[in-house]
Amino acid sequence: MSNIDKQALREKFEAWWEVNYHNGNPPRFGWEHWRDGDGYKIDDDESELDGMWESWQAAHSSKLEDLEELVELQRFKLERQAEDLHQAKSLESIHREKRYEAKREFSSYKERADSNTMRRAKEVCHLEEALQAAGIRIDVED
């Protein structure tokens, strides 16, 4: 847990303690007087402040760890979505290129087919003319 997280947790504990155990007021001499490193000073055998702080930390640090795990899981999901998006864009680009190639090939095929049709039509016309010149009659059925 970072120092910022620990400080925020301590401030929440102190606010909670003030409301629940001291009528909304800070303790005598202020919090700075009672803070002792990561814990609190004990002034007599009846002081429960340090024990309460340890319990508070244990309860909230597990919540914080759960939140950190949730954040890590969300980060992982976002990374996977970014990878999937990148892959989808790559596939879209490949699909666009293949579609362009297919259109170009179809256009070329169509031009060749049209050209072959024209060539065959001319050949048929020449053949019909040659047959008529030779006196051979052609009957065309509908």
Image (cartoon, rainbow, N blue to C red):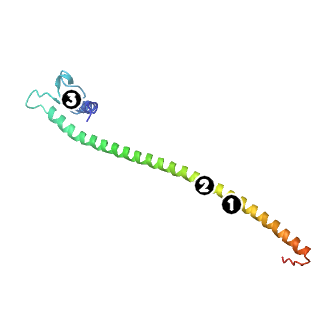
Element type where label 2 sits in the image: helix
Image coordinates of residue 114 in percent, x first then y, are: 75, 61
Q: Position of residue 24 (x, y in %)?
A: 25, 28
User: Dividing the image into 4 quarters, which one contains the N terminus?
Assistant: top left
Type of the residue with mark 3: His
**Residue displayed at 84% across by 71% down:** 127
Is 103 positioned to the left or the right of 2 in the image? right
Q: Quadrant of residue 65?
A: top left
- Say left or right for 93 vs 66: right
Q: Amino acid at mark 2?
A: Arg
Name the residue: 24% across, 33% down.
13
Check the image and report above or below for 109 versus 68: below
Precedes in sequence: disc 1 or disc 3 = 3
Q: Residue furthest top?
A: 29
Residue visible at 90% across and 76% down in the picture:
134
Hey, which quadrant is residue 137 in on the image?
bottom right
Residue placed farthest to the front in the image?
134
Q: Is 115 in front, or is 10?
A: 115
For mark 1, give the secondary structure.
helix
Task: Residue at 15%, 32% (x, y): give it.
Answer: 50
Q: CA distance from mark 1 to mark 3?
A: 90 Å
Residue that carries the numbered disc 3 in the rendered image: 22
